[in-house]
Amino acid sequence: MTGDWRTEWTTALDALELDVSRAEAMLAEGHRLADEPAADPWHPPANIGPLPLDLRPRADAILARQIAAAEAIAGRLASNRQQSAVVSRMETGERVKRPVYLDCAM
């Protein structure tokens, strides 16, 4: 094991908290900014030992925020699908453009 295991766990939790904060910010803005880089998937650090008990409440709070963000994202996706379905059935008031064929064989 390299370094202080408590410090390594704190660093790992900082990374998780930053990821969930970004997701919450995107949800609060109502859209994803085009220049926002895609998040890298989080991987637990190797060989740092078990989570220290005094960090458990923080880890639980981060997990709760992640679950809430995931539920909000799922809700927004469902809403987008419903809106897309409604829009696809709307009539715009324009005339329907049909192909016109002219038989020049005669």
Image: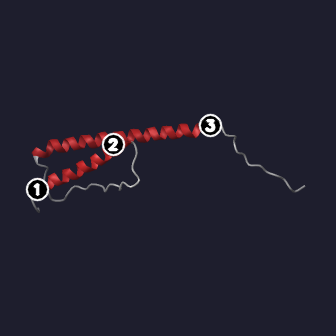
Q: Do the residues bearing badges 1 and 2 touch, measured as CB atoms within 8 Å?
A: no
Upstream in the sequence, badge 3 or badge 1?
A: 1
Q: Residue furthest bottom?
A: 2
Residue at left offset 14%, top offset 44%: 56
Q: Where is residue 77 drawn, in percent x and y?
A: 42, 42
Residue that appears at 25% across and 40% down: 64
Q: Secondary structure at mark 1?
A: helix
Q: Residue at x 35, y 39 (%)?
A: 72
Residue sitting at the far right: 106
> Mark 2 sits on what residue?
70
Q: Are marks 3 and 1 in contact (CB under 8 Å)?
A: no
Residue 15, horizontal then vertical, whole percent: 23, 53
Q: Earlier in the sequence, mark 1 or mark 2?
A: 1
Precedes in sequence: disc 3 or disc 2: 2
- Asked if residue 86 lies left or right of residue 77, the reply is right
Indicate whether 52 appears above or below 45: above
Quadrant where the C terminus sits is bottom right
- Judging by the rendered image, the residue that carries numbered circle 1 is 5
Tell me the mark number nearer the camera, choosing from 3 and 2: 3
The part of the image, by quadrant, that contains residue 97 is top right
For label 3, the SS is loop
Q: Is residue 37 positioned above or below 78 on the image?
A: below
| Residue wearing tag 3 | 91
Q: Alpha-carbon distance for marks 1 and 2?
A: 29 Å
Q: What is the spatial separation of the Cα atoms under label 3 and label 1, in whole angstroms?
A: 62 Å
Task: Identify the image's colour scheme: rainbow, by chain, secondary structure or one colour.
Answer: secondary structure
Label 1 environment density (alpha carbons within 10 Å; few <14, some 14–19, many ≥20): some
Residue at screen point 31% across, 43% down: 24
